[in-house]
Structure formats: C-alpha cells, structure tokens
Image (cartoon, rainbow, N blue to C red):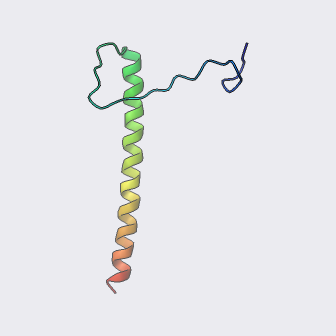
Amino acid sequence: MAVFDDEPGAPPARKIAHEIGQDLYRVSVEELGERIALLREEIARLEREVASKSAQRNAADLLFKR
C-alpha cells in the first residue's frame, strides 16, 4: 500500500480542470466550488501579469520619451 502520492502504485492525484462552456449537469456542488476557486486563482494570476507588463511598459515609455 502506498503511503505517499508519488510512490509506485499510488492512485493518481485528482486534477481539477475546467473547460469554458463545458456541460455542468454531472458536476457536483463540491466540484463546482473547486472549479470556482481554481478560476479565481487563475484570474488573480492573470491580473498580476497584466499589472507587471503594464509597469514594464510604463517604465520603457518613460525611458524612451526622454
């Protein structure tokens, strides 16, 4: 019997994935909550990247406008 997930014979870890527009009829309330959390984390990651790229762009604009 495997004690850790990375041991041979351990069942694969359940990976949550969501496809935009996917039929949600058979998805449980618990899984819907997990998907919402996953999507919120992804939105936050994307917003951080937008902020980072905007800051880089603004710095470049200031540098080259001199």
Q: Residue at x 38, y 36 (%)?
A: 40
Residue extending farthest front: 8
Residue at the location (39% across, 73% down)? 59
The spot of residue 13 in percent (x, y) is 57, 23
Q: Quadrant of residue 44?
A: top left
Which residue is located at x 36 percent, y 50 percent? 47
Q: Is residue 53 left or right of residue 6?
A: left
Number of labels in the image equals: 0
In-image side of 3 versus 19 (left or right):
right
Tell me where residue 41 appears, x and y as whole percent: 42, 38
**Residue at x-position 38% and y-position 75%:** 60
Residue 60, above or below 4: below
For the N terminus, the image quarter is top right
Q: Is residue 1 left or right of residue 45?
A: right
Judging depth in this view, the residue of 62 and 3 nearest the camera is 3
Where residue 25 appears, as percent x and y from the top left, is 29, 14
* Quadrant for the C terminus in the image: bottom left
Whether 66 is drawn above or below 34: the answer is below
Pick the front one: 44 or 19:
19
Where residue 64 appears, x then y in whole percent? 35, 82
Q: Residue 32, located in which quarter of the rendered image?
A: top left
Which residue lies most toward the bottom here? Answer: 66
